[in-house]
Image: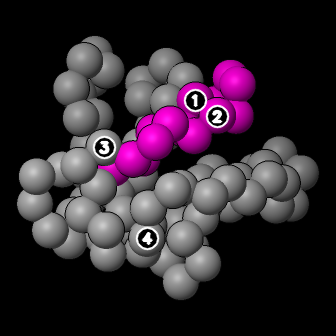
Amino acid sequence: MYVANRDSGDISIFDTATTTFGATVTTGGTGPQGIAVSPDGVHVYVTNANSGDLSVLDTVTGHMAAPVSTGGSDPLGLAVSPDGAHV
């Protein structure tokens, strides 16, 4: 499970099997808010409400890509299409 930490600018990874928090990953943006996971579980998408962008975490490598502009301000929620082709 992924938890957005809006005030600290990162996301926490919670292991539901052990009920413990693992890694915390900085999003590169400010004010992480919405989180969606790709159907295959390989990518975690995070909206950064304060900076108006979107971050993408590769769950295999643990690498957070540089934020991408959403073209708007204050993005909050998001969704991934069932085939994973669109966010």
Please give the residue where the numbered disc 4 appears in the rendered image: 30
Q: Does the magenta stretch include residue 46?
A: no
> At x 64% / y 34%, what residue is drawn?
63
**Contact (Cβ within 8 Å) of mark 1 with mark 2:** yes
Mark toward the start of the polypeptide (2 vs 3): 2
Task: Provide residue 19's location: percent of width, then percent of height.
Answer: 84, 59
The three-letter amino acid code for the residue at tag 3 is Val
Left or right position of 40 against 80: right
Task: Provide residue 39's location: percent of width, then percent of height.
Answer: 42, 24
Give the distance between the C-alpha atoms of the residues marked 4 and 2, in whole angstroms: 17 Å
Tell me which segment is drawn in magenta: 54-67
Task: Provide residue 84's location: percent of width, then percent of height.
Answer: 31, 21
Element type at mark 1: strand
**What secondary structure prevails in the magenta region?**
loop
Q: Is residue 84 above or below residue 38?
A: above
Element type at mark 3: strand
Q: Which mark is residue 63?
A: 2
Residue 14 visible: no
Q: Residues within 10 Å of mark 3 (few under 14, many from 20)?
A: some
> At x 36% / y 63%, what residue is drawn?
48
The three-letter amino acid code for the residue at tag 1 is Asp
Q: Which mark is residue 68?
A: 3
Q: Identify the residue at the far bottom of this view.
A: 7
Left or right position of 77 against 73: right
Give the distance between the C-alpha atoms of the residues marked 1 and 2, in whole angstroms: 5 Å
Please give the residue where the numbered disc 1 appears in the rendered image: 58
Element type at mark 2: loop
Q: How crowded is mark 2: few (under 14 residues within 10 Å), some or many (20 or more)?
A: few
